[in-house]
Image (cartoon, rainbow, N blue to C red):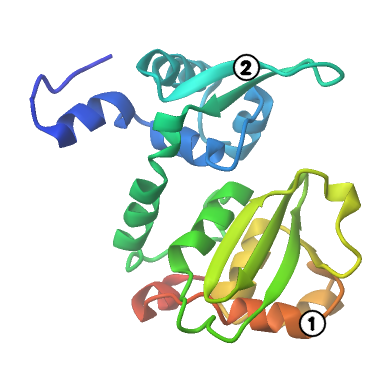
Amino acid sequence: MRSYADACGITRALDLVGERWAIPVVRELMFGPRRYSDLATALPGVSTNILGSRLKELTEAGVVEKRRLPAPAASTVYALTPWGEALEPVLIALGRWAAHTPTDLENHAFSASSFALSLKTTFDPVAAAEVNVRLCLEMGEDVFDAEVGDGAFAIQRSPDPARASASTTRVVAEPKTLADLVYADLDLTEATRNGSLRLDGSARSVDSFTRCFTLPERQKEGIR
């Protein structure tokens, strides 16, 4: 690995996670262990050799660890170490810092983890003060449980997507469609009518949920 050979804490951090594609790998692992194939799918712009190199480097640095899941899964996954998990506020801060830059969702990749982390980045406790709602967000094979209550927000990968509570509203759509719903005023009724989104449950719950996330105006204008 290349090094800045600089004693500053910032450059030492960049020595560890500053290589191209390192931070996106960390982002994809922020919500739990993933297989190599999951990471390759979520990061379509990275070549197999670069992805393998980043995982190897992050593992050697102690940011990521390689695990073997027990039977019946019996598959190899990558996961963040506790030290790697401590990067979450750094990623959120980076996302907020870049909030004013235009975003072209039509032409750029946008994974389920990217959307989930964006919700953490843009959550507005003031707007959510009177909201108590729980959603199941299904984005292909990626399923997340999201909950707003008492001015707080939590989101995590669903431990058992097939057994979501009957009282929980389920929203099925691609990450870009959900981003448009939350950030670009996509009409929920129109999205369900044209088939880009499936709703099982309360439309009112979805409307309440989307009001809990606030984008700076300049970023909102840049999203298509």
Using residue 57 as the reference point, say whether residue 78 is left or right of it: right
- Which is more toward the observer, 134 or 26? 134
Using residue 57 as the reference point, say whether residue 149 is left or right of it: right
Compared to residue 165, the image places residue 68 above or below, namely above
Residues tagged 1 and 2 counted as in contact (Cβ below 8 A)? no
Residue at image coords 84%, 16%: 71
Q: Earlier in the sequence, mark 1 or mark 2?
A: 2
Q: Secondary structure at mark 2?
A: strand
Q: x and y percent of residue 61 in the render? A: 36, 17
Q: x and y percent of residue 44 in the render? A: 58, 36
Q: In the rendered structure, which amino acid carries the disc numbered 2?
A: Arg
Q: Secondary structure at mark 1?
A: helix
Q: Which mark is residue 67?
A: 2
Residue at image coords 40%, 13%: 60
Compared to residue 168, the image places residue 139 above or below, namely above
Location of residue 138 (image quadrant): bottom right
Location of residue 97 (image quadrant): bottom left
Report the Cα–Cα distance between label 1 and label 2: 40 Å
Q: x and y percent of residue 191 in the render? A: 77, 76
Compared to residue 17, the image places residue 102 above or below, namely below
Q: Which residue is mark 1?
A: 203
Using residue 1 as the reference point, say whether residue 127 is left or right of it: right
Asked whether residue 173 is in view, the answer is yes
Q: x and y percent of residue 33 in the render? A: 62, 31
Q: Nearer the viewer, mark 1 or mark 2?
A: 2
Q: Quadrant of the N terminus?
A: top left
Compared to residue 175, the image places residue 194 above or below, namely below
Asked whether residue 111 is in view, the answer is no
- Which is more toward the observer, 216 or 30? 30
Residue at image coords 40%, 37%: 23
Q: In the rendered structure, which amino acid carries the disc numbered 1?
A: Ala
